[in-house]
Image: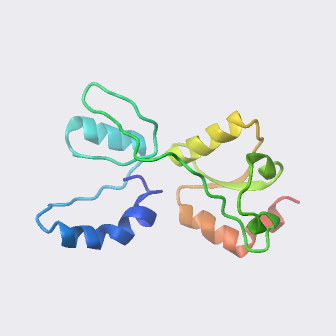
Amino acid sequence: MIPTILPYLIAPRIGEFLKGFPDVDLKLVEDATPRLVEQLQSGDLDIACDGSACEKTQTSYAASCSVNRFFLAVAEDHPLARKSTADLGDLANEPLLLLKEGHCLRDSVLMACTRAKAELRSIFETDQLESIFQLIKSGFWCDSGS
């Protein structure tokens, strides 16, 4: 699993899965997409979940489980917090906190912004989504643009 999936989608459900399938010998690996693909192709992993697009390789098939929807995380007092949806244009000149290069979620966000011709102003990059969430919660976005 990629680090952006495991703590939020897999970890909360893993206990229920193991109760339902007690004979499964489960080993979880958290890593970046390229290393997961290498381990999958070498036979070290049986299955890998990441955020990359579908593609066929010589030894495996990748299948999409869902269409990517992006969620915008803002502080409670941010003007966009009152909106049920936001367009990428709403983010113009907003300071953004992004995952570092090498994370497929970052790549997907940047690709969506490029397609929408939305310019980004990144003020912080990290390997951990939780760091981004905590900085947003603290109001970090308020002081960073000046």
Looking at the image, residue 72 sits to the left or right of residue 43; the answer is right
Q: Is residue 79 visible?
A: yes
Q: Is residue 103 visible?
A: no
In x, y percent, where is residue 67? 50, 45
Identify whether 3 is placed above or below 46: below
Q: Nearer the viewer, residue 111 or 145?
A: 111
Residue 14, image quadrant = bottom left
In x, y percent, where is residue 135? 67, 69
Looking at the image, residue 93 sits to the left or right of residue 113; the answer is right
Residue situated furthest top in the rendering? 58
Identify whether 93 is placed above or below 76: above
Identify whether 64 is placed above or below 122: above
In x, y percent, where is residue 109? 62, 45
Q: Residue shown at 14%/69% (left/top)?
A: 22
Q: Residue shown at 76%/41% (left/top)?
A: 118
Q: Residue shown at 36%/39% (left/top)?
A: 63
Residue 134, image quadrant = bottom right
In x, y percent, where is residue 66? 45, 47
Identify whether 87 is placed above or below 61: below
Which image quarter is the C terminus in?
A: bottom right
Residue situated furthest left in the rendering? 23
Q: How is the image coloured?
A: rainbow
Residue situated furthest front in the rendering? 84
Count of numbered circles on the image: 0
